[in-house]
């Protein structure tokens, strides 16, 4: 197991992403954060915390379960664990920021987009992520990102939440090449 981001790096990176969101959107008006269950939810919570710290306003925060929207649901999920989606009202004409922990093939994000459209037609949907590990199968890229890491496809990147906060680890024995994103 190799540490990719410690709790302080995660916090600092999400604080930077919160600032980028506020700058691009000129505040929180019409903004909604939606974490993809399960890994994106704690990341979205911490991002919402930093937005509130910087803007002194809470941004609506929700979660979306993509289980039934996966393109492999019929073959890969013989006993799916379906959880609730908690969307804070209609997404009609909102600026929705979909939040995930790790972006890999793009299929999870595609499923989240399909699920979110059941809650209205947003004005715009953007993607924020903690880690982009490459390996895309679909043309989906994060708009806001804490770190890029080249991780072999056979290895996992897990985001762990503990008493110190969120941290990202690679479940492997080899060292990936890591490049922080430019602000």
Image (tube, rainbow, N blue to C red):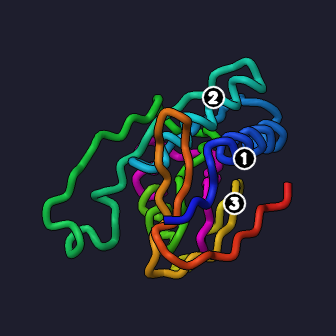
Whether 163 is drawn above or below 173: the answer is above
Which mark is in front, 1 or 2? 1
Q: Residue at x 59, y 70 (%)?
A: 133
Dot label at residue 49: 2
Horizontal placement of 161 versus 58: left or right?
left
Horizontal placement of 10 versus 119: left or right?
right
Tell me residue 6's x, y (percent). Answer: 62, 49
Q: Nearer the viewer, residue 55 or 25?
A: 55
Of the numbered discs 3 and 2, the one sitting upstream in the chain is: 2
Q: Secondary structure at mark 3?
A: strand
Residue 127 visible (yes or no): no
Q: Which residues are magenta?
A: 113-134
Label 1 crowd bin: few (<14), some (14–19), many (20+), radius 10 Å? many
Which residue, given by chain and number where applicable, does mark 1 sit on? 13
Tell me residue 39's x, y (percent). Answer: 45, 50
Q: Nearer the viewer, residue 50 or 179?
A: 179
């Amino acid at each position: 197991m190799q540490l990719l981001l410690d709790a302080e790096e995660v916090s600092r990176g999400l604080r930077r992403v919160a600032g980028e969101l506020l700058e691009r959107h000129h505040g929180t008006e019409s903004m909604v954060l939606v974490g993809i269950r399960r890994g994106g939810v704690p990341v979205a919570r911490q991002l919402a915390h930093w937005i509130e710290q910087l803007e002194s306003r809470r941004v609506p925060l929700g979660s979306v379960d993509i289980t039934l929207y996966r393109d492999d649901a019929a073959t890969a999920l013989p006993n799916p664990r379906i959880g609730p989606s908690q969307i804070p009202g209609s997404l009609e004409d909102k600026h929705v920021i979909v939040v995930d922990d790790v972006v890999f093939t793009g299929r999870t994000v595609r499923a989240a987009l399909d699920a979110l459209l059941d809650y209205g037609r947003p004005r715009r949907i953007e993607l924020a992520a903690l880690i982009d590990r490459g390996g895309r199968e679909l043309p989906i890229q994060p708009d806001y990102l804490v770190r890029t890491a080249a991780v072999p496809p056979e290895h996992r990147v897990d985001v762990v939440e503990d008493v110190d906060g969120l941290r990202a680890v690679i479940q492997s024995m080899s060292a990936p090449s890591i490049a922080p994103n430019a602000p």
